Image (tube, grey):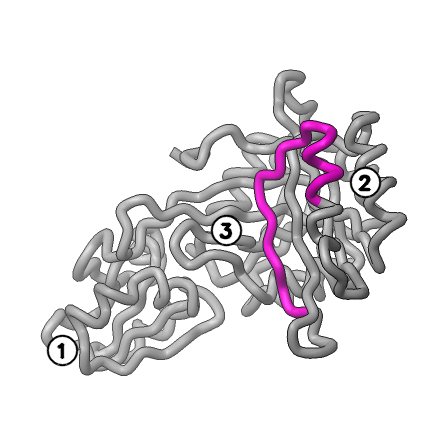
Amino acid sequence: MRIGVLGLKGSYSEKAAKQWIARNVCGDDNSLEHCSDIQDVFSLLENKKCEIGVVPLENSIEGSVGITLDLLLEKDVNIIGETIVTIEHCLLSRGKKEDIRVILSHPQGLGQCRNFLKKTFPLAELRTTGSTSHAAKLATEFEEMAAIASPETADVYNLDILMPNIQDRKHNHTRFVVITRSETTENMIKSLKQADPYSTYKTSIIVYLDRDRPGALYSILGEFARNNINLTRIESRPSKKVLGDYVFYIDLEGNISDDIIKDAIYNIESSVGMLKMLGSYPGLNSCCESN
């Protein structure tokens, strides 16, 4: 099985993929395809150069990853799983702390360490990279450069950990989703280890109202409330059509094979402009899944 992940060797996405593989994939005949950005992971899937992709969806400090949300809407993919990784950002470099002039990381990494950077390196130039592991690789070139990345990445690129645990919040977790092409979803699910029969399933959908009217969103949420369906996440994202026009990303507890879920989604679909089913998959019971 070929699995596309964001970043070079040592990235958090790689860690997420290995974590999910260990729990869900039979056998060890798997290879990781490292991608320079999230869009490339989706492209690998689309071009049938990998069977599965693992991409970050949301972080407990910085919130959702916008490009992942957009591509879930635009591309013909399904979510078949999720995993949560504990994020431990470190400042990595070949040089000394007092010599650092440039700090590199993925935008999420920089955002998760915003207060630390402002307080500790107020004059440093901040540069964004496609992944934290790519930042670490670039930081090997000059001693005045540092990267925000995982401690494991320091070993991969022979960098020193100048400062550990530099994120602004002690508890920092990123949720990654496991995606596959819609046409192969059923076969991929069958090839995985059988889920724990007591697992709580999660279903993810995208809804576009198409027309703004009083109570439009309330009518959707009311359908779930009337059926006692718990929503674990709801988020709006610009539709990119006109200002003030949104699509809604909704995660809910339950499996699409459950009659109550199936009926609720059927009733909603008839009253909205578009409803995209992203998939039903075993949900996680704890934000500390990776510990």
Q: Residue at x 66, y 53 (%)?
A: 249
Q: Residue at x 64, y 50 (%)?
A: 3
Label of residue 265 in the image: 2
Residue under circle 3?
A: 14
Q: Residue at x 80, y 36 (%)?
A: 264
Q: Residue furthest top?
A: 197
Q: Could you tell me how far apart the alpha carbons at marks 2 and 1 are, in whole angstroms?
A: 57 Å
Residue type indicated by callout 3: Glu
**First in sequence: mark 3 vs mark 2:** 3
Q: Is residue 194 left or right of residue 149?
A: right
Residue under circle 1?
A: 99
Name the element at disc 3. helix
**Residue 177 visible in this rendered orientation of the protein:** yes
> What stretch of residues is rendered in magenta?
221-238
Residue 203, position in %: x, y? Answer: 70, 38
Q: Quadrant of the C terminus?
A: top left
Q: Is residue 193 left or right of residue 109?
A: right
Name the element at disc 2. helix
Q: Find out whether residue 20 is within the magenta segment.
A: no
Residue 67, position in %: x, y? Answer: 60, 66
Residue type indicated by callout 2: Ile
Residue type indicated by callout 1: Asp
Q: Is residue 263 left or right of residue 32?
A: right
Q: Could you tell me how far apart the alpha carbons at marks 3 and 2 are, in whole angstroms?
A: 34 Å
